[in-house]
Image: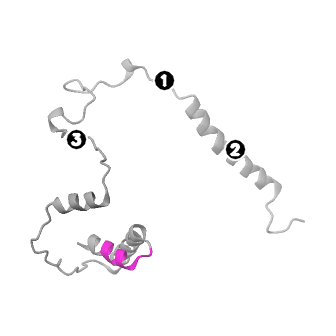
Amino acid sequence: MSTPDRPRGGIRAALFVIAGTASVVPALLVANAPVIPHQARAQPQGPARTGRVVPPAEVPAVEPVAFVDMTPDEARAYNASVPFSTDPNPAARPFVFRGTAEDKARALDCLAAGVLYEAGDDAKGEQAVAQVVLN
């Protein structure tokens, strides 16, 4: 007589077959993928596609990044030369949630996960991340 916590031989064999099939079939599909000839592909309607998604005129020029070896004093002087805004920075309006209790619970869980992921266990960082998300 078998104990209730051990599966019987038939169930064990079925699970072994299922696990083997789940492992072997995807590997066989990938290894023996069908070759689709270029002529058999559907031709797009309208003008011929060139492979580019964005026209060349819309792609901005990007300057290469160059690292400059500076002493700490040179770096401070360079940072001081970068313009800084002195305009007033008014506080954001208070956040008011409008939704169901279930939506609020989901939103709060999402906010908490984002804060923990971005700031870790730093209280000031958590406050900053939460404020940015709410803004």
Which label was assigned to residue 67? none
Q: Decide which of tag 1 and tag 2 comes sooner along the chain.
A: 2
State the residue position of label 1: 35
Q: Local crowd at mark 2 within 10 Å, few (<14), some, or many (≥20)?
A: few
Report the mark closest to the observer, 2 or 3.
3
**Which quadrant of the figure contains the C terminus?**
bottom left
Residue 120 falls in image quadrant: bottom left
**Which quadrant of the figure contains the N terminus?**
bottom right
- Magenta segment: 121-130
State the residue position of label 3: 62
Q: Decide which of tag 3 and tag 1 comes sooner along the chain.
A: 1
Give the side of residue 85 with respect to residue 65, left or right. left
What's the residue type where badge 3 is placed? Val
Q: Considering the numbered disc 3 on the image, is that residue within a helix, a strand or a loop? A: loop
Q: Residue at x 72, y 52 (%)?
A: 15
Q: Local crowd at mark 3 within 10 Å, few (<14), some, or many (≥20)?
A: few
- Residue 3, position as x, y percentages in the image: 85, 68
Q: Considering the numbered disc 2 on the image, is that residue within a helix, a strand or a loop? A: helix
Closer-to-camera residue (99/13): 99
Q: Is residue 48 above or below residue 123?
A: above
Q: Decide which of tag 2 and tag 3 comes sooner along the chain.
A: 2
Q: Is residue 25 above or below residue 38?
A: below
Closer-to-camera residue (104/92): 92
Q: Considering the numbered disc 1 on the image, is that residue within a helix, a strand or a loop? A: loop
Residue 102 falls in image quadrant: bottom left
Query: How far apart are labels 3 and 1 at the CA level?
Result: 39 Å
State the residue position of label 2: 20
Query: How far apart are labels 1 and 2 at the CA level?
Result: 26 Å
What's the residue type where badge 2 is placed? Gly
- Residue 109, position as x, y percentages in the image: 40, 74
